[in-house]
Amino acid sequence: KNLDAAVAAYQKAIQLKLNYAYAYCNLGFALQEQKKLDAAVAAFQKALTLPDDTSVTPTTSHTVTYNSLGLVFQQQGKLKDAMKQFDKAEDLDPSFVYSGNNYREAERLLTEKENKLGSVEDDRQWLPKNDPAVPIKRSVVRITAKFFNSDRQGTEIGTGVIIQRKGDRTLILTNRHVIFDGNEQGKNIQVEFFSSPPSNRVRMRRDAKLFKMTSEEQLDLAVLEVIGKLPEDIQPLPISLSAIAPKMPIRIIGHSAQRGEDKSWSMESGQISYQNQRLEISQAALKPGYSGSPVIDSQNQLLGIVFAKKGEDRDLAYPMSEIQKQLSTWNIK
């Protein structure tokens, strides 16, 4: 009933202002929610014939519409068409991260479909032989979660680090905002493990569920749980016992969505200083996708976890001493 009312409201807005692209775009959203996909496509395509509205957030009306059209085509199984729309959205606004994230997800689905791929049980044959950072990268995961609202339009990407492995149960630490936007939890949460598969294969993934999450007033932390067998070399990252010194050299592993390049498991070098129970990071270029990234010392041990704060220009991290206090309240040791 709410969706019917929304459809009626958007149709009325269209009657009042025939050239209002966002009204057609919103109509498409509501029809998509009702699973009326062909009607949604028609609404989105109409929006694209109207002048682009650049006064809105988080991006222009045409960028949102191309991205939304791609998501509908993906629902219809038209993966190549979906990728074309995501590409057009990224052309219009390269800083709108969801079009790039969605493109890469559709590309993965297409690879699975064209090569009739099943679940990857063991990916060790795809590990690079000459990369000394492989053991660390295996402790770091790429997290994906699906959202669809005015702020998050498709696949959210973040980083997590393995903190516990017992039998078939693995716990992964990340930021709360990667999988929860303040109102809803992301759907279809998955974690992807590091490897370098050939172009006709995809990296190993596992379904994850939310195990623990802080409230809005606390540290921005969440713990995901993965149940099932994993290759033996995937292990928790050891926690550093080093005292944090001013301008201490560190490295950060995270995932950025740069167009045309797979920048997953990128390693950024920088420095940290300890200030007011937080770590301030300098000389490291962190991008969207680095939320939840591990900060590691020269011994490849875990010093802290990156977090993002609205309105904050600095790159910040929580030190493990503060994180461990929260983990202990959840009986995670």
Image (tube, rainbow, N blue to C red):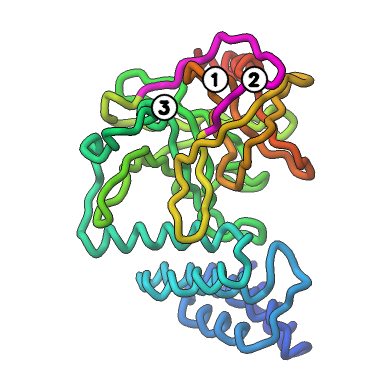
Q: Amino acid at mark 2?
A: Met
Which residue corresponds to mark 2?
248
Report the span colored magenta: 235-252
Q: CA distance from mark 3 to mark 1?
A: 11 Å
Q: Where residue 32 is drawn, which disc sits there? A: none
Callout in the foreground (3, 2): 2
Residue drawn at x 48%, y 16% is 299
**Residue at image x 70%, y 62%?**
58
x, y (%) of residue 281?
68, 30
Instruction: Determine whether 187 is above or below 228 in the image.
Output: below
Q: Quadrant of residue 20?
A: bottom right
Q: Which residue is mark 3?
A: 136
Q: Which residue is pictured at 52% across the width and 55% down the height?
A: 258
The reply to whether the C-beta atoms of the residues labelled 1 and 2 are less than 8 Å apart is yes
The local crowd at label 3, few if under 14, some if 14 to 19, many if 20 or more residues have their Cα within 10 Å, is many
**Magenta span main SS:** loop
Question: How many labels were placed on the picture?
Answer: 3
Q: What is the x, y in percent for residue 42?
A: 53, 85
CA gap, disc 3 to disc 2? 19 Å
- Asked if residue 128 is among those painted magenta in the image, a careful observer would answer no
**311 left or right of 165?**
right
Q: Earlier in the sequence, mark 3 or mark 1?
A: 3
Residue 290 vs residue 175, the one in the foreground: 290
Given the image, on which type of amino acid does mark 3 rest? Ile
